[in-house]
Image: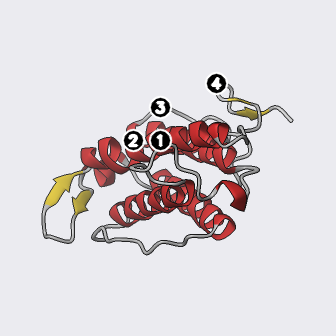
Amino acid sequence: MNYRNIPDYPAGVTANTILVRMIDGLGFRYYWATEGLTENEMQFRPHETSMNLVELLDHIHHLANVSNRVLHGLQSEKTPPVGSLEPIRNSTLKLIETMRERLGTMNSEELAVVKFRRADGAEFPFWHLINGPIADALTHVGQINSWRRMAGNPQPKTDVFLGKALN
């Protein structure tokens, strides 16, 4: 899967299939936010206090890695920066796909017992995965779109409502 288009609808509506669709939306939006980026834009930052594009990409990669670790019952951990466009893009898209696959194999009971375990030993219920790293990743994908537009390389046109490429 490469997220050029959002995959077909899930077969039914459950907590898990809703989350799968959210992850598909993240994958689609990330794919297109990063499609056609060049190394020229990687150091762009709209303000001295904000992350540049490569730092944003590293952060989204970290969020996808944390989400995968949580879904697989592992403690969250800091992800080292990748710092280069294609490797980080490919790795992040693979992590998003892995998250989708994991959610697709879980039932509601399995999902209900997922715990977000931080390195400091604190544990939080599954809900924090949604309002934490998943929502954060969506926010940062929007920043990539805005910043690349400011840097002079806008995202290719897509239909985000239908989840389809337009080219």
Between residues 41 and 60, which one lies in front from this camera angle?
Answer: 41
Left or right, residue 15 beside residue 7: left
**Element class at badge 1:** helix
Marks 2/4 in contact by CB < 8 Å: the verdict is no
Which kind of residue does numbered mark 4 sit on?
Phe
Tag 4 residue? 161
Q: Residue 87, can we see it?
A: yes
Residue 150's place in the image compared with 110, above or below, is: above
Q: Earlier in the sequence, mark 3 or mark 1?
A: 3
Marks 1/2 in contact by CB < 8 Å: the verdict is yes
Which kind of residue does numbered mark 1 sit on?
Leu
Image location of residue 165, percent across then percent down? 78, 36
Single out the mark in the foreground, 2 or 3. 2
Left or right, residue 42 beside residue 132: right
Q: Specify the label residue 13 is tagged with.
A: 3
Q: CA distance from mark 3 to mark 1?
A: 22 Å
Which kind of residue does numbered mark 2 sit on?
Ala
